[in-house]
Image (spheres, rainbow, N blue to C red):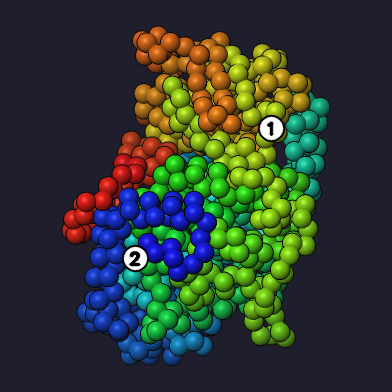
Amino acid sequence: MNQAQEHVHPVVAEVTDRIAERSRESRAAYLARISAATSAAAGQPTRAAMGCGNLAHGFAACAGDDRLAMRGLRKPGIAIVSAYNDLLSAHQPLHEFPEWIKDSAREAGGVAQFAGGVPAMCDGITQGRAGMELSLFSRDVIAMATGVALSHDMFDGTLLLGVCDKIVPGLLIGALSFGHLPAMLVPAGPMTSGLPNKEKARIRQLYAEGKASREDLLEAESASYHSPGTCTFYGTANSNQLVVEVMGLHLPGASFVHPGTPLRKALTEEAGRRIVEISRGEEYTPLGQLVDERSVVNGLVALLATGGSTNHTLHLVAIAAAAGIQLTWDDFADLSAAVPLLASVYPNGSADINHFHAAGGVQFLVRTLLDAGLLHRDVKTIAGPGLDRYRQEPVLDGDTLTWREATSHSLDESVLRPVERPLADNGGLRMVEGNLGRAVIKVSAVAPENRAVEAPARVFSTQAEFDAAFRAGELDRDVVVVLRNQGPHANGMPELHGLTPALGVLMDRGYRVALLTDGRMSGASGKIPAAIHLTPEAAAGGPLARIADGDVVRLDTEAGTLEMRIDAAELDAREPSDGAPDETQWSGTGRELFAALRRNVGPADAGASVFGPMTPGHLGVTAPRTEASVGGPS
């Protein structure tokens, strides 16, 4: 990796180089595989290699000029893979997109076909319910469904329509299996701002204390989540959009334009034109070459600089692995120490994603990080070579979409700062480890005085048990709440957002409070010091299975330690308590259909994936032998 061609921060350069060195064999094997697929096309549309019967099936439903084009083997075929459904507010706008895309692709000299739909569940609806135990697994199901859609070998480019949580990572993982094809993410944009997030959090805490009615809570929630579009807090959905744009997988400025606006329609139509352009000729930009070590690091830096979702400690690892790149939690930790926090968006502040966008958004973020050498400039993007293109914002000049240079300064430094005046000197994402294992903690919203907690543990195996103890007043003390058997192998690693209001109440009462779990919290832990994604998980025999009520636990985010105050021999001698639900208990709401994924899922620090590492052997490709260490998650 030659860093001499661009000014790159030394830590960014060092981490990128070691990722490349660690991944040398697996990345070479991946590139060899997609190169072989590219060579097979030999400059013609992919479908040219098909038998007549296969091809006839592929265009049987086409009509008019599209039918002639598909039969004539001249124009590139574009796959539309969509996660549209009416249930997700963020995805409801996608129902109009395919027809817009088909028209614009046709204008550009291509033929777009709706190749397949993928499932898309709403974590907001399933929070605290049995369906949430399928949420993380849905990412890999989406990847497989994307693979099914693209397996027809009719296509020369792919448009991936999706926004939320596991959906964007799943679409990307699936598309990377067809990495010889250009691919682009097509977002829908956020809903307009509703009830301020701080007020919503206040009502939630009042309800947890029994001081607000269900009707009060429902009124607050429906005033916050009120229309089509992405939820406006900075959770995984909006983190997805920012990360993939900085990776060069969106059109510049596409992430946070509202649905139902002329600019959103114009950007969607341009996606149809642009994917045709990059599917052939001099602009040919295969996804598997675009997603490389530098673009992965760029996405990670952007995540850290904005205090994005901790779910990406899973998703970015899994996405990188799908491209033969071995990303580890050490890479996250080292970059977080060097990347300043530049954004204050709920739950890391009171602003929402619309305020972030109005302050300068992704374009200002890219500008200030590039100028500081914290992003790789010399990368491939779907908009063309070089990340400088992402300093520009889209605008309509009459009916014509164009791009102009975006603001050179933040329009609201309470929301978005330049590198020279950060909100904090580091990205706020820490790794802690000790005799209980290793965990992730997001401290960007945690006050400095709350970043080290030592207290007796209170152990639970379900959220319901925790809620009952809180309502009974049993947690009114300094406490480290331990919620175990929430890892991927135990029950699918559900998000545990429902804990946050009650934990916030305890903190507001003046108690020292922390959370320790092998489950997930996304970005919703807020002001609570929460060590999450603990690995090894309890169900895999991790030390978490042997904690008992009253054991003293110390979580120190500044020192990077997570320790139970107990002799190692005594801890090892203990028998595991509780246990993950068995196959009979883990059933209903479709969970039994996912039993094979539960049995085969990998650990959190390897992406919690069912696919396994993308090694040369896994890919079925023999890469040149090197003396480089391959390392990384297994």
Front one among 28 and 583: 28
Position above or below: 101 against 492: below
The crowding category of the residue bearing disc 1, from other C-alpha atoms within 10 Å (few below 14, some 14 to 19, many at least 20), is few
Q: Nearer the viewer, mark 2 or mark 1?
A: 1
Is residue 412 in view? yes
Residue drawn at x 30%, y 78% as measured from the top left: 46
Expressed as whole percent of the image width and height from the top left, the position of residue 511 reads: 71, 19
Whole-angstrom CA distance, mark 2 to mark 1, is 45 Å
Quarter-of-image position of residue 632: top left
Circle 1 residue: 448
Q: Quadrant of the N terminus?
A: bottom left
Identity, as a three-letter code, of the amino acid under mark 2: Phe
Circle 2 residue: 178
Quarter-of-image position of residue 479: top right
Number of numbered tags placed on the structure image: 2
Position above or below: 558 against 188: above
Expressed as whole percent of the image width and height from the top left, the position of residue 415 reads: 74, 53
Residue drawn at x 60%, y 46% as measured from the top left: 427
Front one among 414 and 156: 414
Residue drawn at x 38%, y 90% as measured from the top left: 68
- The local secondary structure at tag 2 comes to loop
